[in-house]
Image (cartoon, grey):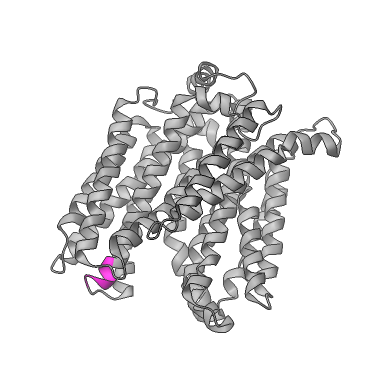
Amino acid sequence: MTSRGGTAKGAEAKGAEAKGATADSATEGKAFGFRYLGPLLLGSTLNPINSSMIATGLIGIGSEFRLGPGQTASLISVLYLFSSVMQPTMGKLAGLLGPRRVFVSGIVILLVAGLVGALAPSFGFLLVSRALIGIGTSAAYPTAMALVRARADARGIGVPSRVLGAFSIAAQVTIVVGLPLGGILVSTLGWRALFSVNIPLALVTLAATLTGVERDAERPRASLKALVHALDLPGIALFGGAVVALLTFLSGLDSPQWWLATVALAVAAAFIWRERHASSPLIDVRALASNGPLQRTYSRQLLVGLGIYACMYGMSQWMEEGRGLDAAAVGAIMIPLSLVSIVVARLVSLRGWVRVPLILAGAALVATAAMMGTANVGTSVVLLVVMTSLLGLTNGFSGFANQTALYVQSPSEGIAVAAGLYRTFSYMGAIFSSSLIGLVFGARATEPGFHALAWVLMGIGTAVLVMTLVDRKIPRTAN
């Protein structure tokens, strides 16, 4: 996260320096015009869009290759697993090779992935395509954060609140367009379009990046051996092993494989030992251990991600199976979630608020869970819209604020790896949410199961609220 020997005090000093330098919106707008920011925003949405689109094509894929739901669902998990491992790895590569080079390389990998998936003669090729999509799209967010931080620091802008808000809003828009876009593609062009759509998206992003984002600064030439050593391949392998074992364990909590939890702990311990002794670690665990504010931001992001995904998926399943609404009605009821998220994220980013929105995010999650706990088959559609809107408040308040806390608490030279690890914690929350829903619902999304989920989410929201209230290191504003 920081160079070897870095401390929390040093990280906080750098964060304070970043917060101390402020700029008006005109200065920020000139530094981050659409030509520069556009491809970075588009690239950062490609991973979540691919995560959600595939859900609409699983039935068609299973039918063509004569596979069951469990096998086709592996297309979802393989992307999550590769993304979880590759996000911080791409951040590490950005520090060695330059963020723009890694960003462009990731888009090229996505282009290849789209071709492989569109022409796949067997299900195995689809798995390869999804793995490549996970690798390629994982380059976007950490390198985008590194590019933004470098430009902001070079121009003395401090924390570019509007830019960070734009990334948060882009994530909210992804929630809106992912599933509908997938549905349109599958219904008009077939499931292969879910893969081939990455070809034009990659080409547009690539062209915009090459023309709108300046080249990386020249770096001293290093031998291949030196680069491989600096990349810390053993650390990447151990990190990947620990993440895969943990996420596989979390994805099957309905019948827990405890040996996987043991493996995850053992490999994680080996990873920490390796990183403490490596000259160029993937993650500087010494610095991270001394940077309490950043640790708490990661924990908050995991809990908020778990709460939001569990609410979102749990609500939609219960409204369809328990409440008896059709899919179109459920989709319409869920729209306010994204709309409220976008409006709130925009408002918060314009003001640069950090601490208060995080408090409100926890409170909104508690309120959402409370409404879920009282919902039943007679609950009106109006109240269901209020319930999804409350979840939108949680999403909108937390998205910008947590991202800004990460930005402030991470040193410039470690922002790419820090941002990648931030996404890894988000994926952990997403995968854990699916297991949580399976545990409380069982075979069907019944009302008792929905109420049980509400109690769990009440606890998660309370934990987020308490963590934020007692954490005095969270800045009040980004400025």
Please tell me in which quadrant of the rendered image residue 275 appears.
top right
Quadrant in which the N terminus appears: top right
Q: Position of residue 47 (x, y in %)?
A: 55, 55
Name the spot of residue 176 as percent of width and height, x first. 42, 60
Give the quarter of the figure containing the C terminus: top left
Q: Which residues are magenta?
A: 318-323
Instruction: Look at 30% across and 44% down and name the residue there.
Output: 460
Q: Quadrant of residue 413?
A: top right
**Residue 106 placement, left or right of 219:** left
Image position of 252 with respect to 402: above or below: below
What is the magenta segment's predominant secondary structure?
A: helix
Image height of 65 relative to 25, above or below: below
Q: Nearer the viewer, residue 247 or 366?
A: 247
Q: Position of residue 178 (x, y in %)?
A: 47, 63
Any magenta on residue 136? no
* Image position of 338 (left or right of 131): left
Residue 97: tell me if it is visible: yes
Please report the residue visible at 53 percent of the width from the left and 83 percent of the height from the top: 63
Residue at (64% x, 53% y) in the render = 135
419 up-or-down from 249: above or below:
above
